[in-house]
């Protein structure tokens, strides 16, 4: 197996390209993996660590290739290099992404475009390049890692918009590319804890995690090791009849409200006058006594 992972069976007969840190399970399953991101030093260190860790368990290898997924020519070069190295690409996992906390009124054009280009446009570039170079003729499986944003997420409108767009892109490509034997699905994680994930948001990151946990029915965060098995399931023959879906892996958070509280206010238009309005005012005041 070979796959490409774009970051921020014991026979190695398939090739994967990945763009995220969910490659431990593919390695264990005997897949050669190409990982890609902008910062080659970190990428190389990750590949060395993984190769050393899993060398006794699997003949599969991890190869780092530098790539900025915001640039279409670099994505196409990544795919070309992977094909030159392994001869085919069976799987693509898109997890290149990121955001910063900011309410919409304060997001600059530069900040907005950076997040959209990474989360949405970069995902599209990777899907398109792999499809045109290999999967159009040979089929394959694509998994896009997005986020649980179905109810909107105050404070990251740029990322929420991009992730929601990827959900729809996944459905559209599933329809367009089915005739080529391509399956494509998305995974929408909720709050996933790692040291670097929390550190990315500074002190506010710790507050955000602690504040969110009580709203999660599971009453805890996930860890990356709980996302990677879902990726492998969707890549595997066990999911051979699944395409075009977004699978939430969020401990039930998307069923139970928002991550951030909304501020109180009294700016909304008043209720229309009438009996129901008067009853509602009594409800708020604690004097309402229902009767049938």
Image (cartoon, helix red, strand yellow):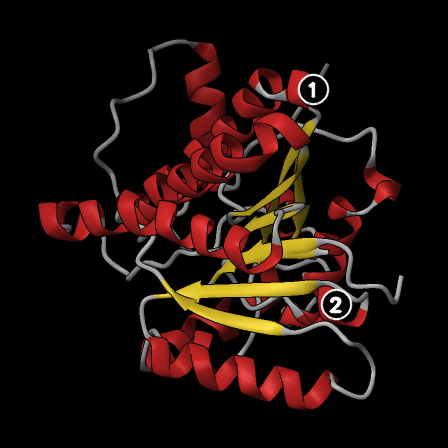
Foreground of the two, 203 or 239: 239
- How many numbered dots are placed on residues in this image? 2
Q: Residues within 10 Å of mark 2 (few under 14, many from 20)?
A: some
Q: Give the CA distance from mark 1 to mark 2.
A: 59 Å
| Nearest the eye: 212 or 135 | 135
Relative depth, front residue between 182 and 114: 182
Q: Quadrant of residue 251?
A: bottom right
- For this view, does 14 lie left or right of residue 167? right
Q: From the viewer's perspective, is 90 left or right of 229? A: left
- The percent coordinates of residue 220 (x first, y second) are 67, 70
Label disc, if present, on residue 291 of the rendered structure: 1
* Disc 2 secondary structure class: helix
Where is residue 196 shown, x and y percent of the image? 44, 80
Residue 186 percent coordinates (x, y): 60, 41
- Could you tell me residue 21's position as x and y percent? 56, 68
Instruction: Note whether residue 229 is visible.
Output: yes
Q: Quadrant of the N terminus?
A: bottom right
Q: Give above or below for 138 relative to 189.
A: above
| Secondary structure beneath label 1 | loop
Can you say whether 25 is above or below 235 in the image?
Answer: below
Instruction: Check disc 2 and report the residue beneath it.
Output: 25
Give the position of the C terminus as an image quadrant.
top right
Mark 1 vs 2: CB contact within 8 A: no
Q: From the image, state whether disc 1 or disc 2 is nearer to you.
A: 2
Residue 152 visible from this viewpoint: no
Left or right, 97 with reference to 23: left
Residue at horizontal 49 percent and vertical 36 percent from the top: 133
| Of the image marks 1 and 2, the number of the one nearer the N terminus | 2
Residue at 49%, 49% in the rendered image: 258
Q: Callout 1 environment at 10 Å: few (<14), some (14 to 19), or many (20+)?
A: few
Residue beneath the point at 66% across and 25% down: 290
Give the residue drawn at x 55%, y 86%.
Answer: 48
């Amino acid at each position: 197996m070979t796959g490409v992972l774009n970051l921020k069976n014991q026979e190695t007969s398939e090739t994967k390209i990945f763009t995220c840190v969910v490659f431990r399970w593919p390695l264990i399953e005997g897949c050669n993996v190409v990982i890609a991101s902008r910062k080659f030093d970190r990428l190389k260190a990750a590949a060395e660590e993984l190769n050393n860790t899993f060398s006794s368990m699997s003949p599969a290898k991890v190869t780092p290739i530098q790539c900025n997924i915001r640039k279409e020519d670099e994505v196409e070069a990544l795919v070309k290099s992977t094909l030159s190295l392994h001869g085919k690409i069976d799987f693509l996992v898109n997890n290149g992404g990121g955001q910063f906390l900011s309410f919409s009124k304060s997001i600059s054009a530069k900040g907005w475009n950076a997040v959209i280009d990474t989360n949405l446009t970069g995902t599209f570039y990777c899907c398109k390049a792999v499809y045109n170079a290999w999967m159009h003729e040979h089929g394959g499986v694509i998994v896009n890692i997005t986020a649980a944003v179905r109810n909107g997420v105050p404070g990251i409108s740029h990322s929420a918009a991009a992730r929601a767009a990827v959900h729809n892109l996944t459905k559209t490509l599933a329809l367009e590319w089915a005739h080529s034997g391509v399956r494509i699905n998305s995974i929408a994680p909720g709050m996933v804890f790692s040291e670097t994930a929390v550190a990315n948001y500074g002190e506010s990151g710790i507050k955000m995690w602690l504040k969110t946990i009580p709203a999660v029915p599971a009453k805890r965060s996930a860890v990356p090791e709980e996302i990677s098995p879902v990726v492998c399931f969707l890549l595997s023959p066990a999911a051979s009849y699944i395409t075009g879906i977004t699978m939430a892996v969020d401990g039930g958070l998307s069923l139970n409200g928002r991550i951030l509280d909304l501020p109180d206010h009294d700016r909304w238009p008043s209720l229309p006058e009438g009996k129901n309005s008067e009853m509602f005012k009594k409800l708020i005041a604690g004097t309402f006594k229902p009767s049938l």
